[in-house]
Amino acid sequence: MILAPLTMTGRLASLGGILLLAAPPLARAELRLATPPAVDPEAGCLVWIEHRQDEGPWRLADPDDLTVDVTGGGRLGKDPSGLLTNPVTVLATAADGGIDMTVGLGGESVSRRLPIGAPPPEGRFRLSLPAGLAPGHAFEGFGGGVLFYDNQWEITDNDDLYEWCFRDVETRFLHLLVRPDYEPANDNDDWRTLAADRFDFTASQRALGVARRAIATRPELEVYVSLYSPPAWMKANDSTAGTAGLKTGEVFRRELAEYLAAFLIHAKREHGIDVAYLAFFNEPDWPHSQDGMHVKDLGELADIFADAAEALETILAGHDDLAMPRLVFPDSLGPGSITRAGRGTQALLARRAMLRERVAVWGVHDYWNTGGYWDTRYRELREFPPVAGKPIWMTEWAQRSRRGDLASGVEYAEKILNSIRLGSQAWMVFEWIHPSENQSGLLSTDWSARPPRRRYWRSKAYHVFRQLANSTPVGSRVVATRGRLEGLSGRSLTAGGPLVEHLAVRTDDELILHLASGHHAPIGLALELEGVNLDRPEVLATGPTGDARQLDAVPPTLPPHTLLTIRAGLE
């Protein structure tokens, strides 16, 4: 990766690598481009645009602040969203020669000439599997959400969206949202008795309709619902905003259970939907302005969970057609929000007996991070005594910046493989469908577009997700691996993780190996797979030049910005 900075101090020029300053600087600003050594004439390349002030940290520049001009033997690739992204895609229009690129930021500019040609391989990734392929934790499936953007499912009257999401992708979980506005005021003073006429479920009719069609398309889907916030009258801040928890007292915990029971009854009787999994919270460890509950004391959080679970069980016992959902706890910002919460962690330890009895799944998101934590996050949670061997699910992640289609696909691949390899047993994307300003969904929509541009499309992240979901069987078991780079170092600028991420799972008669590259050049592959028959494997590749392309054999190199899947029989 070529990282050549340009110092901006008023007007300046660069001649032969020498910076010519026009005047002494008042504030030192720098702009740099991270480019490959050559632009592949078939696949193009990604170029990152970074800046910093006064020798501070390098950061990706906001694409709204940039101007980018590409001439010569190339052109600027257009993102499907129609917006400028960072990194940008540069495509060759000639077989050789060069591409001229000029980037502007804050009135300054930097230029670069990029040669056209296939970048040579760099380094090698060596992957070793243990003899006997001893299996580890079980994989329980992929899932996706229909949460805040359920209105996006009405962008078309045809069956495309349901075919793409629920017929073409082998997912197991469908994540729905319990909204906060079904019960504007307390229905009555008895939490055991529902006054049905005091509840209005209009706000969830659309999402429940999507779920009904999804299940008709894929009957094995299991519905998982999360409460973000109950109605404002139950909250300590008299608001649905996630800056406070429930009002004090058992009465509000029982009213919370009644509220959830009302939703479960409505979903079953009006839509025929059985809820298999239920979470009482969503990121309760993080105060925020969106709908939510913030409960800083994890001991109090556990007590709310215990009292509400008991009350919900009591209510549902009176309804023969409803089973008590399996409970997910606590859906925190990340595993470390549980294991590294200081006194909060100790409070959960003190309630371990209740948690072992009540919690069916330990759910976490994958946003919380701190130094020295990422590679141990799931191992720490697995060793936490209250978990007691229960499944650990990663129940929400999304790429939330305007990285662009290809770069977002690479980031999804890295995050999914890393999470499952290190210990999560299910992986769920935040939204199946999301407006296209960033890559928070697998399908993107653009309501303002006019023909001939499509108004909804499958992103590169969708194709990555589909390849992984369709080739990682539910019930397969993760195999311990050892992967190391030789002759190459660094981290993927696409995703911020390692240049190569990987995952191996096995069934009784098959090994499935996933490799994802965030590097700009091919990386040599050295696979040490004792007991695996690589004579006639199935090999799939999703990257710059195609989606789930079938290859004839395992390639000698891992292509740039590509997810490679190898399925081979066990000897």
Image (cartoon, rainbow, N blue to C red):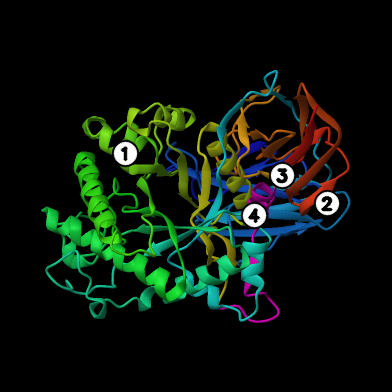
What amino acid is at disc 3?
Thr
**Residue marked by disc 4:** 170
Q: Quick check: 259 left or right of 448?
A: left
Q: Report the Cα–Cα distance between label 4 and label 3.
A: 21 Å
User: Which label's residue is closer to the chain start, 1 or 2?
Assistant: 2
Q: Nearer the viewer, residue 520 or 366?
A: 366
User: Which label's residue is closer to the chain start, 3 or 2?
Assistant: 2
**Mark seen at residue 357:** 1
Q: Quadrant of residue 69?
A: bottom right
**Residue marked by disc 3:** 562
Q: Report the Cα–Cα distance between label 3 and label 1.
A: 43 Å
Q: Quadrant of residue 329?
A: top left
Q: Secondary structure beneath disc 4?
A: loop
What amino acid is at disc 2?
Glu
User: Which label's residue is closer to the chain start, 4 or 2?
Assistant: 2
Q: Decide: few, some or many residues near mark 1? Use Cα within 10 Å; few <14, some 14-19, many ≥20.
A: few
Q: Secondary structure beneath disc 3?
A: loop
Q: Secondary structure beneath disc 1?
A: helix
Residue visible at 24% across and 50% down in the picture: 310
User: Which label's residue is closer to the chain start, 1 or 4?
Assistant: 4
